[in-house]
Image (tube, helix red, strand yellow):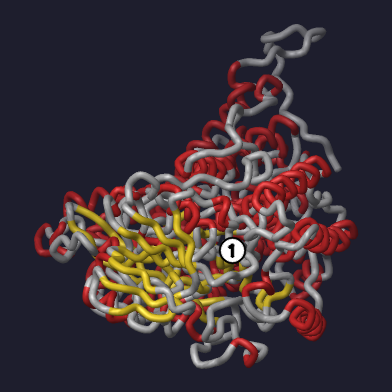
Amino acid sequence: MAAVTTTPAPAGDSSSSPDEPPKKTLRSYIWDADSHLKSPQERRLLLKLDLAILIIGCFGFFMKFLDQTNMISAYISGMREDLSMLGNEYTYATTTYTVGYAIMQIPSTLIVQKIPPSIWLGAMEVGWGIWTFAQAGLSSSSQLYAFRFLVGLFEASFSPVVLYVIGGWYTKTELAKRTTLFQITAPLGAAFSGYLQAAVYEKLDGRNGLAGWRWLYIICGLMTVPVGIATFFFFPDTPYKKKPWFLTEEEHAIALRRVQNVGIAPPAKITWRTFTRILGRWRIYAFVFGYVLYGCSSLAGGFFGIWLKSEGFSVVDSNVIPSGTWLISGFLSLTWGYLSDITKSSFAWAHEVCRDDNEERAIVASGMNGMSYAILAWLPIIIFPQTMAPDFRYGFPASFGLLIVAVIGAGIAGVSAAAYLLKEGLSVTVFERSSVGGGIWHFDERIPADLQYPNQRPSLGDYQVSQRGEFGSLTPPPESSAGYPDSDPDIELRFAPPGPCYAGLKNNIPTSVLVSSLGPWPEGTEQKISQELAERYIRGLATLHGVTAVTRVHTRVDEVKASPDGGGWEVRTVSLEKRHGAARLRERLWHFDLVVVATGHYCTPRIPGFVGLKEWKAAFPDRIIHSKQYRRPQRFQGQNVLIIGAGVSSSDICRELVGIANKVYQSVRGGAYDTPIHMLPESTIRVGPIEEFQPPIPGQILLKDGQILQDIHAVVLATGYITSYPFLSHLHSDNTALDEADENILITSDGEMVHNLHKDIFYIPNPTLAFIGVPYHAAAFTLFGFQAQVLARVFAGKARLPSRAEMVEEYKKKVEEKGRGRSFHSLAGHGAEVGYVREIVEWVNRDGEALGEPKVEAHAEEWVKEYEEFKTRITEECCPDGHTPEPLSP
């Protein structure tokens, strides 16, 4: 291959001594790296070529992309509504454009072998300008399809022909930079489309009775046609053909010597042998395949504005924000172009590789574009159908190469899951129904509403699930309060009932043990802390690991169902939108590949069915509450209070009522996990289980041992919680007994356990649905971190699940060993939690080792030692007689 040479300086040029190399000038640094080696005549030639080719090429390509991308700007600025576009009609319109664009790619570079590029491109550009202008008069989707096809057909020639001409004039040290300057006008044009539409929408919308999007097409058409006319006069042919009028004979001769010296082949007659020669080489296949991948990866940008509009962004913002991606693309392209020329590498690879064959260079360049657009003609119909807007469950993941995951809940379980999924490179969205994350550690003074007395259907949960379409999507949200109902002070309370956190809540496992693998507690944190510090810790971890950025608060999940086509999950959410002092609810349907449930245990209170309790509650609703509704002890000042239950929350409330309530009774059933009586305040009176509530209030309560409690003013049901996932109601069976669950049911009538989970994480019938935080009686923060790491490895394809038959067999074996019910998920036994973690970690590490993945480390020895010492100490303090206390929860 001949080296790049330059025209020798003519005799008499004494700009440098024959013994000294020419010195670099400023031009050499900012334009051509070898400019100081070129003669004045050659530099003058390049200046003329740059002015003609780059100015015409860049302005034309700018207008081409402006006119190509202005449809998305028009669509989100009113065209959809004005043309009553439904279903996938937007996608079909992009497809008709792409079809027209694809079919003219290769023919265009063959046509300019016969017709001068200036004439052909000028005619094409004027043509697409006219059809762009004509779109201002659209009245139907059918007209849009026809006009977009014609715009694509006329635009198709511009890029391949200009690149073909550029590749015919410039040498290796000049080509990349100029190719890049031409190419970056594409993202600049796309970016400008957003800014232009934003300005048009603000200034011209409604002017002379025309909508803003119609003015956009008028302005774009008027901008395009003059550039097309200029092309007729200034754009040159290749140097082997007719001399451009603006070059002298000497300059044309210099141009010919330059391209001959670097091996750029002259045009030859096109025959069938031309095509067999080209198709018999590797070049066309390699370059076309690579460019198709590039085109597919950038497809998502055209749908970004639709997503923004669905998120409630204004018309102006939905047009302007996507321009940022185009501007970044332009900057990086320019950077690589400059580096390519400076280092003499081949950024403009196809033109360099094919420069020894003029026809191959033309066909490869146009084939890259043509095949890319041929694929893009049908691909959006499959992965970006408008019926999947705005999240495009196939399109965005296919473009970015990501699996998309929904995580339900932003407590420590959800934060752990999301953080490790993000670390594995998955796309994550976290849904949190309340206004902030933090889970059960977030204190809310408001009291959740009462539920049904007693519980009868676990599938109902603690909120009223909406019906599909009840809160139909409004896009975008109104920019004034006009679209919102009158302010309802209780709407947020009903939408997201507050959790069980009370003002005096503290952890009962020391922070040195109750610690997340995502990060340590702040230095100086005490072993026992307030709920405020615990919440701050969780939210700090969420921010540190990028979870906060992907969390959608005030967004409740009302339904999760497998997609009808079997490709992932449909997730229906309802969002609480607040603006101008008013609020409304808005429904949205999402599509995810994977779903993680991390809603915890403490959502749906267990309301027992004691005789007479329902009547007491109906007569005096404020006197009977569940511990989830307990906030502060002051409400029980001077009262006789009965607390039913002997768990952690019951004992805490007993202690808080000392010195405030008149009398405090604690009713227990005598279970194995009852808190020992010596741990209660001396003033607390422990009694047996309830037989019947007898009217009135203050009234009497009959115990099973025949004892009667008199003058009870208030009752606190510290009776725990049932497991409930109302958004998975189709996997509940409210009429099925615990021991009758089949291989598909998640929750039975008792709400005591989650059936059919592998390792207490993966739903066996469809493991793309998973759960974090199901086990009881463990150091939650620590355990959830291990579960999340295992989950993330499996979802990222770095660990393999057993077959369904193997998972079912293992699950049945565990049922035989532990029985069904609450104890099935308990890790209370000696070494149970450590053993469980070791088991799941060893499983994923076996597969990870084969892939070269770093090991997931199980509990550190120091942690295990401290945890065991803590449990031993608690057992000795609580039960000196050897009685087993209630396993601790955080």
Q: Residue 764: tell me if it is visible.
A: yes
Query: Closer to the camera, 160 or 459?
Result: 459
Residue 673 horizontal side relative to residue 559, left or right: right
Give the crowd class for mark 1: few <14, some 14-19, many >=20 residues within 10 Å: some
Give the quadrant of residue 466.
bottom left
Q: Residue at x 47, y 55 (%)?
A: 440
* Type of amino acid at the residue the image marks with label 1: Asp
- Per the image, the residue denoted by label 1 is 674
Residue 535: x percent and y percent?
48, 45
Q: In the rendered view, tell whether residue 628 sits above or below residue 168.
A: below
Quadrant of the image containing the N terminus? top right
Q: Nearer the viewer, residue 19 or 268?
A: 19
Location of residue 117 in the rendering, given as x and y in whole percent from the top left corner: 52, 56
Q: Is residue 863 left or right of residue 60?
A: right
Vertical placement of 243 versus 818: above or below?
above
Front residue of 651 and 690: 690
Residue at image position (76%, 54%) is 354
Asked if residue 168 is positioned above or below residue 613 in the image, the reply reads above
Q: Quadrant of residue 518?
A: top right
Secondary element at tag 1? loop
Residue 564 vs residue 776: left or right? left
Pinpoint residue 501: horizontal percent, then vertical percent.
43, 53
Task: Tell me if 778 is positioned left or right of 716 in this view.
Answer: right
Residue 295 in sight: no
